């Protein structure tokens, strides 16, 4: 059975997601639909890219992903290079459909796409601009799962629009990152990877600071229950990113890390590799 995933900023209080799924099932009745998230902050392609990067390795080859975040095309006939077309990108053996608004470069990083195509129906049928996720991306996704040759409905392209990601910065013995995502539990996911941490650390102790050194953590935990309920911790999550959390804390009970520490998207996280840490070497943490 073919799989199509949905990642949108549409929420679930309106009819939009139901309309997407109804159209999908009308065109491809046997497809399996999986919701990745419908609660991306409106138009935040960085959040959409983070979620998909975190889970695409768990999907089988040829899975088709529809990204309905800031999906409206922009056709500029006077400055064609400024146009934003609905686009298909093949990456890690899977297909991603969305607007060429910088999302694809955030998803792939420095990796090269295995194929890129532009959907140009919107040029001859401008009415498709109304609800483009349903009217453009959904039909294209169904054509992919139905095995229709790409040349029948899209055109190959060489380049996609680039977006500049917020990347960690190394400054001497300090690694500076930022909050890139806040999950359902209020956990703070940063853009600092375990690879970054080990490369900069040079086997010396460390302290993780946030909120301008108002709070700190000097230990990396292997699991949430290594600290008592209600205590803060730092952990490298399943996707390899540094996460700051409160064990068994959630926004609902007032105990999520984001609410307790007042951290927001884009806030700076500093790791200073100095003798003030509590472990002898970084190697002893893992």
Image (cartoon, grey):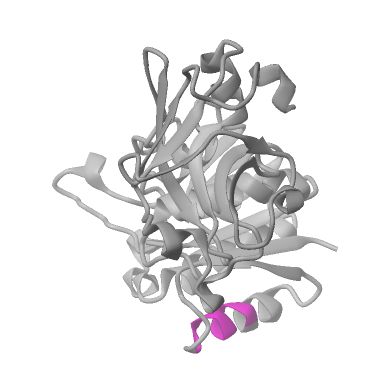
Residue at the spot 57% in from the left edge and 67% down from the top edge: 184
Residue 37 image-quadrant placement: bottom right
Compared with residue 211, is residue 162 higher up or lower down, i.e. above or below? above
Image location (x, y in percent) of residue 59: 76, 50
Which image quadrant is residue 174 in? top left
Q: Which residue is drawn at 67% across and 55% down?
A: 64
Q: Reply above or below: 270 against 33.
A: above
In the rendered image, the vertical position of residue 252 relative to residue 239, given as above or below: below
In front of the other: 55 or 94: 55
Q: Estimate the x, y position of residue 208 in percent, counting from the top left.
A: 47, 34
Q: Main secondary structure of the magenta part?
A: helix
Residue 80 falls in image quadrant: top left
Most extreme residue toward the right is 1
Residue 71: where, in percent of width, then height?
Answer: 40, 62
Q: x, y (%) of residue 283?
A: 71, 18
Residue numbers of the magenta segment: 15-21
| Location of the C terminus (image quadrant) | top right
Tell me the quarter of the image containing the N terminus.
bottom right
In the image, residue 257 lies in the stretch drawn in magenta: no
Asked whether 65 or 37 is in front, the reply is 37
Magenta span contains residue 18: yes
């Amino acid at each position: 059975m073919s799989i199509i995933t949905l990642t949108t900023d549409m929420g679930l209080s309106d009819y939009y997601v139901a309309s997407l799924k109804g159209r999908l099932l009308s065109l491809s009745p046997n497809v399996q639909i999986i919701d990745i998230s419908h609660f991306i902050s409106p138009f935040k392609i960085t959040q959409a890219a983070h979620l998909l990067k975190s889970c695409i390795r768990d999907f089988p080859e040829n899975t088709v992903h529809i990204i309905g975040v800031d999906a409206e095309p922009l056709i500029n006939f006077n400055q064609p290079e400024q146009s934003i077309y609905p686009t298909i990108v093949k990456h890690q053996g899977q297909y991603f459909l969305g607007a060429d608004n910088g999302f694809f470069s955030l998803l792939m990083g420095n990796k090269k796409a295995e194929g890129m195509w532009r959907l140009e129906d919107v040029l001859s049928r401008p009415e498709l601009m109304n609800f483009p996720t349903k009217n453009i991306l959904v039909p294209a996704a169904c054509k992919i799962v139905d095995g229709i040759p790409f040349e029948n409905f899209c055109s190959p392209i060489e380049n996609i629009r680039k977006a500049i990601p917020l990347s960690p910065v190394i400054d001497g013995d300090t690694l500076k990152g930022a909050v890139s995502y806040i999950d359902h539990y209020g956990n703070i996911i940063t853009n600092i990877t375990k690879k970054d941490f080990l490369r900069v650390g040079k086997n010396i102790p460390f302290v993780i600071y946030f909120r301008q050194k108002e709070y700190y953590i000097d230990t990396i935990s292997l699991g949430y229950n290594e600290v008592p309920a209600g205590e803060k911790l730092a952990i490298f999550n399943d996707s390899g990113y540094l996460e700051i959390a409160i064990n068994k804390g959630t926004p609902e009970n007032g105990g999520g890390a984001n609410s307790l520490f007042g951290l927001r998207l884009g806030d700076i996280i500093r790791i200073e590799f100095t003798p003030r840490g509590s472990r002898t070497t970084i190697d002893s943490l893992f």
